[in-house]
Structure formats: C-alpha cells, structure tokens
Amino acid sequence: KNQVEQSPQSLIILEGKNCTLQCNYTVSPFSNLRWYKQDTGRGPVSLTIMTFSENTKSNGRYTATLDADTKQSSLHITASQLSDSASYICVVSATGTASKLTFGTGTRLQVTL
Amino acid sequence: DAGVIQSPRHEVTEMGQEVTLRCKPISGHNSLFWYRQTMMRGLELLIYFNNNVPIDDSGMPEDRFSAKMPNASFSTLKIQPSEPRDSAVYFCASGPGPTFGSGTRLTVV
C-alpha cells in the first residue's frame, strides 16, 4: 500500500531559526515528490517538485532534498519568518497514475517571536 | 491567471439539503480534481477528470455525491442529501501540478 509519513507532526520554532521537516514514502513506482505549504483557511500551494533524478531543489528559503534509494525527503527552512507558520504537506506521485497522489498528513509549523 | 476559482467559500446548510460546490479550473489545464480535507483524514481524492471525462471516481464516498464537468472551464460537486459527516473543506485542483483552489468550507448542521 502506498503511504507517505511525515514527521514531526507539529513543530514550534523561534523566528530566525532553521528547521527541517521529514517525509518517508513507500509509493511505487515513484514518479515525483512535491512539497506543499498550506496556510490556515487556504488551499495548498506548491513549493517544490522533484523527480527521481533530482536530489535537491530550492525555492527561496525553502530547500527540498530527495533520496530515492532510501525513499526519504526533507524540507529545510532557513531563517524562518512568522509567515512560514503553516502546514507543510509531502505528496508523492506514482508513475502512470495521474490521479493517485499519496498525501502525507502534514507537519504543522508555528514560528514565534 | 486568477488560479483555480471555487465558490462559495463557505456554505452552511441543514441536514438533508442539496449542496452544490463550483469550480473554475485554470485555463489550459486538462486535469481536474476534487478533494476533501478533514482533520482526521487529511486530503482525500474524491474524483479526477481528464479532458472533461471522469477517470477515477473511486474516492466518492457514496451515491449522495456526484460530480460533473460539462466543459473545460467548469465543474460541480453535488451532495444530495447532505449529512453532518459531510462537513469538511472541499478543494478543487487543476493540473498538471496540481494547483489548488482556496476551498469551500462546508458545514452541515
């Protein structure tokens, strides 16, 4: 069964600090992995998308890594800001199944002063 | 581009009433998805259209739910009759991507 697990479930950090969110998956055959940011009351917004051949991708202060061998991904946030407070969702797509995105349950990040 | 547009943003209805959620996908996108999000279950795919044709509706919970896509620029998700357990945020997304709309928060009392 395809699964995506994220950790931690929630995280509180001080503004300006860095943090790393984890995603482990068992989706097969793997096509791509996306990280989404979901602000409260809004729809998820794509941050990064990585295919099998990519092991790192950046979007501003967000850097995602992918290890296809161990089936792990991480999202690193540098110099956090209050606006980074949101849920971060890891989504994995299997090859040939456009509709079958497997969603993680997300990490709820709170950045405080 | 205005992105994926959903309406209404909020809907409160009484149990047993019919509810219709609407979606306008991004122009040029040929895939459209309806998702439901709850605290307990996270994001769940309800139905997927490709080129206006329903491809995968295995996530539609029961016959009370129906979805249509009469053309490339419009889709509806209908619940009839609605029940309190249908309360959730319903997202429409279009692809490739997918790109999500802002969602409709449905409350059935």
Image: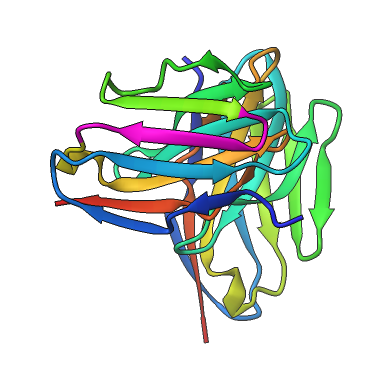
Looking at the picture, tell me which residue is in the foreground, A63 or B27.
Answer: B27
Q: Which residue is drawn at the image coordinates 55% and 46% (left, top)?
A: A89
Measuring from the top left, give residue B12's x and y in whole percent: 25, 56
Q: Quadrant of residue B73?
A: top right
Residue shown at 19% from the left, 33% from the top: B81
Range drawn in magenta: B71-81
Q: Please state which of residues B29 and A88 is positioned toward the viewer in this rendering.
A: B29
Question: Is A71 placed left or right of B48 in the picture?
Answer: right
Quarter of the rendering containing residue A71: top right
Q: State the residue lying farthest toward the right.
A: A53
Residue ID at (79%, 30%): A51
Task: Determine whether, in the image, residue A65 is placed left or right of residue A39.
Answer: right
Depth check, front residue: A43 or A76: A43
Q: Is residue B6 visible?
A: yes
Vertical relation: A19 (above or below) B71: below
Residue B93 magenta-drawn?
no
